Image (tube, rainbow, N blue to C red):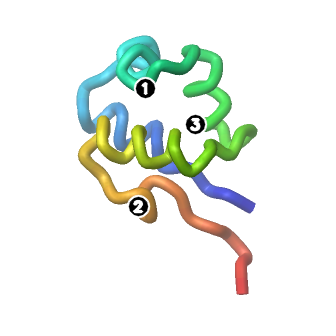
């Protein structure tokens, strides 16, 4: 299961969901789904999120229960 730390990183960066969605060229609903863990982003979107949030991809997303 994919665990998303995007919400915490977004709040630490002082961004709203709307601001982050504009910076990443996706809908606000996409950001909401990623934050809830209901949507796994593409590699490209994960890289863009990491850049915009000044984080590493592996700090934004982790696998829970993975071997």
Quarter holding residue 49 = top left
Which residue was labeled with disc 3? 35
Q: Quadrant of the N terminus?
A: bottom right
Expressed as whole percent of the image width and height from the top left, the position of residue 38 reads: 74, 39
Regarding mark 2 in the picture, which secondary structure is present there? Answer: helix
Which residue was labeled with disc 2? 59
Q: Quadrant of the C terminus?
A: bottom right
Which residue was labeled with disc 1? 24
- Going from the N terminus, do you reach mark 1 or mark 3 first? 1
Q: Residue drawn at (50%, 46%), measured in percent from left and top?
A: 46
C-alpha span from label 2 to label 1:
18 Å
Q: Is 5 rendered above or below residue 49? A: below
Regarding mark 3 in the picture, which secondary structure is present there? Answer: helix
Q: Is 56 rendered above or below residue 67? A: above
Q: Is 67 rendered above or below residue 50? A: below
Q: Residue drawn at (67%, 30%), measured in percent from left and top?
A: 33
Does residue 61 appear left or right of residue 8 in this picture?
Answer: right
Near mark 1 (Cα within 10 A), the count class, few <14, some 14-19 or many ≥20, is some
- Going from the N terminus, do you reach mark 3 or mark 2 first? 3
Regarding mark 1 in the picture, which secondary structure is present there? Answer: helix
C-alpha span from label 3 to label 2:
13 Å
* Callouts 3 and 2 close, C-beta under 8 Å: no
Q: Residue drawn at (68%, 46%), measured in percent from left and top?
A: 40
Expressed as whole percent of the image width and height from the top left, the position of residue 8 reads: 40, 42
Q: Is 7 rendered above or below residue 17? A: below
């Amino acid at each position: 299961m994919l665990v998303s730390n995007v919400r915490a990183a977004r709040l630490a960066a002082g961004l709203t969901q709307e601001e982050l969605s504009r910076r990443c060229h996706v809908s606000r609903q996409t950001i909401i789904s990623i934050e809830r863990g209901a949507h796994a982003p593409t590699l490209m979107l994960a890289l863009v999120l990491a850049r915009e949030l000044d984080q590493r991809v592996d700090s934004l997303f982790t696998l829970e229960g993975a071997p």
